[in-house]
Image (cartoon, grey):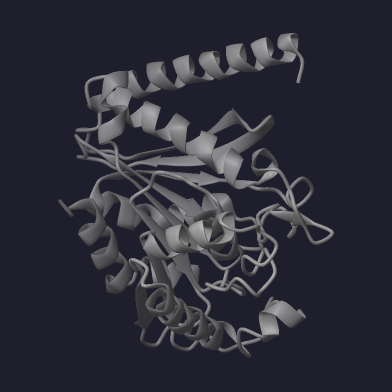
Amino acid sequence: MNALAVYMRATLIALLLLCLTVHAQAFDFSATTPEKFKISLIAGGYVIKVFVFHPANCPNPDVLFVLHGIKRNASKLRDRAAALASKHCTVLFAPLFDADRFPSRRYQRGGITRSGKILAPERWTSHILSELITFSKSYVANCCRGGAQAVKGVRTILFGHSAGGQFLSRVAAYGNLKVERYIVANPSTHVLASTEEPAPYGFAQFKEPDKTTLLRRYLAKPVAIILGNEDTGQKYLNKGSAGMRQGRNRLERGRFTYSKAIKTARELDAHFNWTFIEVDGVGHSSRRILRSEAVSRLVADTLFRK
């Protein structure tokens, strides 16, 4: 990227942040009426549509991101998560990763590899998400936490359902975001805690000592795998060889991924910070997962942890 392009991108980002700040300062978070709207942000060189929800009676909010599934229904996922955001006083951000620019290689599998080779980190889709998080935290800090200097106090939770859960698994495994919780819900595939399974399903192509360092960091992250215990169907299920090695359906794959992570953490004597939850009576449904008491408790525990 040449100097002019760098300057133009920096200028656009500054303008967008200014617009966000103005809107945030104009919004009354103690109001009794919630607000929904759509914004467009430049992140990683892409214009990304983001659907936003402001809860009512929320004077000191944190941030909750929800990452859509294969239907790319970001606005619907925002609406389904609105009750959760209201209950826990979080501003809700639902970015849209469209299929044209972000096919499965770049969304579900995170853009980590191409033809089996690890790409440069700045080409990973997590780089885009990182910039969106930066925007969101600046927005919330300016609206009601005393201004830009309060950004460090804004806590962030990431929730991904199905295809979004696959993406979030890659973000947690290979990225280095500063967030309080990754909630990986009902994904078709996971990143295994394995140095033998190739990326984007493991860490095989990374060189030592980076390989083991990345794996240890992954195990230490606040990852929560949450599954509907009736999510045993085949619709939209990844049936590739890497996916089938994880299990016959999403429920089996989540259980296998978690048990593999526990075993690897013991073998490496590594810090382990994952959580595993099964929700009774729920299948492959973002609506029912988001409205479950299990997810609500998980969000509450994360935000109120000292």
Residue most toward the left? 306
Task: State whether residue 71 appears in this view.
Answer: yes
Task: State whether residue 68 appears in this view.
Answer: no
Nearer-the-camera pick, 133 or 94? 133
What quarter of the picture does the N terminus occupy? top right
Tell me the residue at 65%/10% (across/down). 7
Nearer-the-camera pick, 241 or 278? 241
Does 93 sit left or right of 167 as displayed?
left
The answer to which quarter of the image holds residue 139 is top left
Does 22 sit left or right of 145 as displayed?
right
Does 213 sit left or right of 222 as displayed?
right
Tell me the residue at 65%/48% (across/down). 97
Does 106 sit left or right of 138 as displayed?
right
The answer to which quarter of the image holds residue 248 is bottom right
Q: Position of residue 218 (x, y in %)?
A: 46, 61
Residue most toward the front? 209
Q: Position of residue 195 (x, y in %)?
A: 60, 71
Residue most toward the right? 115
Tell me the residue at 29%/41% (across/down). 62
Query: Residue 274, relative to residue 240: is it above or below?
Result: above
Q: Position of residue 47 (x, y in %)?
A: 66, 31
